[in-house]
Image (spheres, helix red, strand yellow):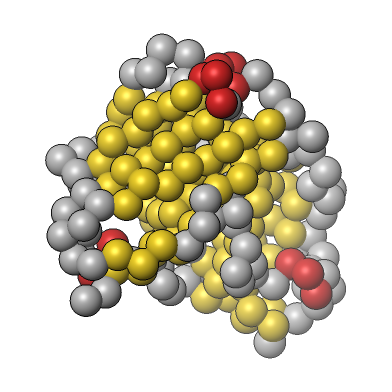
Amino acid sequence: QVQLVQSGAEVKRPGAAVKVSCKTSGYTFTTYAMHWVRQAPGQRLEWMGLINTATGNTKYSQKFQDRVTFTSDTSASTAYMELSSLRSEDTAVYYCARGKPEYDYWGQGTLVTVSS
Amino acid sequence: EVVVTQSPATLSMSPGERATLSCRASQSISRNLAWYQQKPGQAPRLLIYSASTRATGIPVRFSGSGSGTEFTLTISSLQSEDFAVYYCQSSNYFFGQGTKLEIK
């Protein structure tokens, strides 16, 4: 069965970077893009961007494009999201989601807390 | 940039009632719209894609309609497990602000 399993919760200082992983199984990793979506406490879902897992090409939301980097390791069927220059407003749950383009499978979410 | 706006922000209804949630796009997106359900502490779940196609395993009481700029998610007879937040998502991947469906 298809699974997306994300890395565990992180606590970071302002100005630091965080890297979240999303390990997939149950399907051919390079068949679908991987999207990243975040949700701040009590807020709406916010699309951050996507990575074409077959080519490595990325597309970032304008809001994040200066601070976010998506990568993938096809041999490990894993996608990564790195967000730099963290600030308190980046405190959120970060999700990976398989894009068909609709998101039929999601990771369980990774809570990133930014606090001094 | 396509902006999607959902209404109402909150919908208070009773089990067994019919619920209608709306999503409006700022420009035509054909039928490129998806609906998700999210419960507290959980990842969203895909309900509907391409405006009206139910995702795998989604009960028939959930239906989607619309095209262009106006879309609707209908839950024909509310069950207790349907009380949650619902999001629409446009073809450019951006989400609406959500509709909270709460028990009246």
Q: Residue A12: x and y, percent?
A: 30, 64
Residues A97 and B6: in front is A97
Image quarter for residue A3?
A: top right
Image quarter for residue B85?
A: bottom right
Q: How many marks?
A: 0
Q: Is residue A41 above or below residue B51?
A: below
Q: Residue at x 47, y 33 (%)?
A: A79
Image quarter for residue A55?
A: top left
Q: Residue at x 59, y 22 (%)?
A: A29
Q: Residue B71: x and y, percent?
A: 54, 46
Q: Is residue B103 above or below residue B75?
A: below
Q: Is residue A5 left or right of residue A114?
A: right
Question: Most extreme residue toward the bottom, as rendered?
Answer: B104
Work out whether residue A103 can be spotted.
no
Q: Is residue A62 left or right of residue A79?
A: left
Q: Residue at x 55, y 48 (%)?
A: A6
Work out whether residue B79 can be spotted.
yes
Q: Is residue A26 above or below residue B21?
A: above
Q: Residue B92: x and y, percent?
A: 38, 34
Question: Most extreme residue toward the top, as rendered?
Answer: A55
Q: Is residue A55 above or below residue A82?
A: above
Q: Residue at x 68, y 87 (%)?
A: B104
Quadrant location, the N terminus of chain B: top left
Residues B101 and A92: in front is A92
